[in-house]
Image: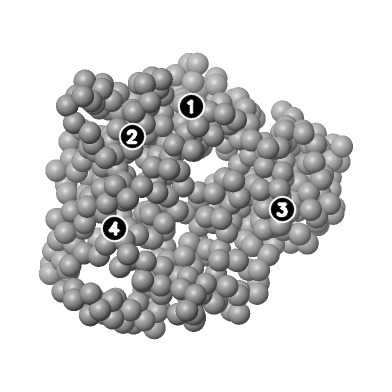
Amino acid sequence: MSLFSESKNTQNGFRNYPLVGSLPDFLRNRHRFLDWTTGVLAGCQSNTATFHRPGKVHGIITASPQIVEHMLKTNFENYPKGIRFRTLLEDFLGRGIFNTDGELWKIQRKTASYEFNTKSLRNFALENVTMELQTRLIPILEKALKNERILDFQDILERFAFDNICKVAFNVDPGCLGGDATSGGEFMQAFEDAATLSSGRFMYAFPGSYKIKKFFNLGSEKTLQKSIVTVHEFADKIIRSRMEEMAKKNDEDLLSRFMGNSEYSAEFLRDIVISFILAGRDTTSSALSWFFWLLSSRTDVEDKILKELENIRRKYGKAIGDTYNFDELREMNYLQAAISEAMRLYPPVPVDTKACKEDDILPDGTFIGKNWLFHTTHMRWEEWKISGEKIVVSINQKDGLKMGFANKKILSNFRFFTRGRDNVLGKTWPIFR
């Protein structure tokens, strides 16, 4: 009923007007959705707000760790991605792991979870990161320093991450960072456009209105479909080639590992790989961009990181410029804690969307109905006011990553990667990169 009467209860967060619900405020603020919703949640007692829009769109947005735990762990089966989520992203992601529910999701997750923890895949990834660092990233930075030239560091990191994840996923080097990209550069741009425009479908005023533009091949939908064709053709070409030479060699990339199952079609393999490229590309570049931005204003933290690196280098007899293996990287406790804290403050994936399968009552007493949307935002935890925007202030050498900030342990507050049965795959990779 709140859809048809203006709400004056500040605990509900969003203003709901007669007939149109929260649509007016949504239209005014969708260009700054994260800032807007974070501000609304700040005025809610339990960091949870209810919204209603025309077209039978109802939902909850929460930043409460207790409610997130309820959704992603305690009552996990009641919160699938849902038909709306899958429909909006199906053109781009198909039936990949980030766009499926049920058994299909479990099968992909089980396989990927095993592969991400194999030593061979980690070594393969480490070799590629090392090559990218030594032959491309560091020379680019050194040249810019020598010529006193300003760089768009976020763009550099996006290219660095894209090259790396393509190698891990396809064992194909698009060469985006080195400036020698041809078809690889086109693939990266098409991938960026497809990801941005697909997610933009969530911001339409009325559900399904994008279908009109798609039917008539207009505007953003025309660009989206063109980008998806480019991405799919690039991926399909690689998969067909790999299938033909499968018997000749055994590569270590993700595609080769999934191809071990003869039941997977070429289209399904494409969907799987595209999903992992999407995840690896965004998390790494976003996490590192915010980390270096924070670090630029905290020379004390920078000094501690450099001191830790110097101690580990001395311990293992490393020279400046030498690479580290996984065991040596694990000993960089302060560096890992600093990156983790940066991701807590500026999450690479700030919003997660699910659907409610059956009526439910959340831990704070909030009702959520069947087929309602459920958005979790990591931009504002309940402990935010307590912990504040502070990067690492102390570290317990005995416990390693159980690092204290504002009298709290980082692993108890840092929930970006700790999400119940939906725990993020490859969660150490942004840190290791």
- Marks 4 and 3 sit apart, C-alpha to C-alpha, by 38 Å
Residue 37 % position (x, y)? 64, 53
Pair 2/4: label in front:
2
Q: In this rendered view, identify the residue nearer to me: 267 or 160.
A: 267
The residue located at (32%, 64%) in the rendering is 327
- Marks 1 and 3 sit apart, C-alpha to C-alpha, by 28 Å
Dot placed on the residue nearer the N-terminal end, 1 or 3: 3
Q: Which residue is mark 2?
A: 257
Q: Which residue is mark 4?
A: 152
The residue located at (46%, 31%) in the rendering is 96
- Marks 4 and 1 sit apart, C-alpha to C-alpha, by 34 Å
Q: In this rendered view, identify the residue nearer to me: 49 or 348.
A: 348
The residue located at (18%, 40%) in the rendering is 181
Residue 370 % position (x, y)? 77, 33
Q: Secondary structure at mark 3?
A: helix
Q: Which residue is mark 3?
A: 67
Q: Secondary structure at mark 2?
A: helix
Q: Amino acid at mark 1?
A: Arg
Do the residues bearing badges 4 and 1 touch, measured as CB atoms within 8 Å?
A: no
Check the picture and name the quadrant holding the C terminus: bottom left
Q: Which mark is residue 24?
A: none
**Vertical placement of residue 212 versus 304, above or below:** above
Q: Which residue is mark 1?
A: 95
Q: Amino acid at mark 2?
A: Arg
Pair 4/3: label in front:
3
Pair 2/1: label in front:
2
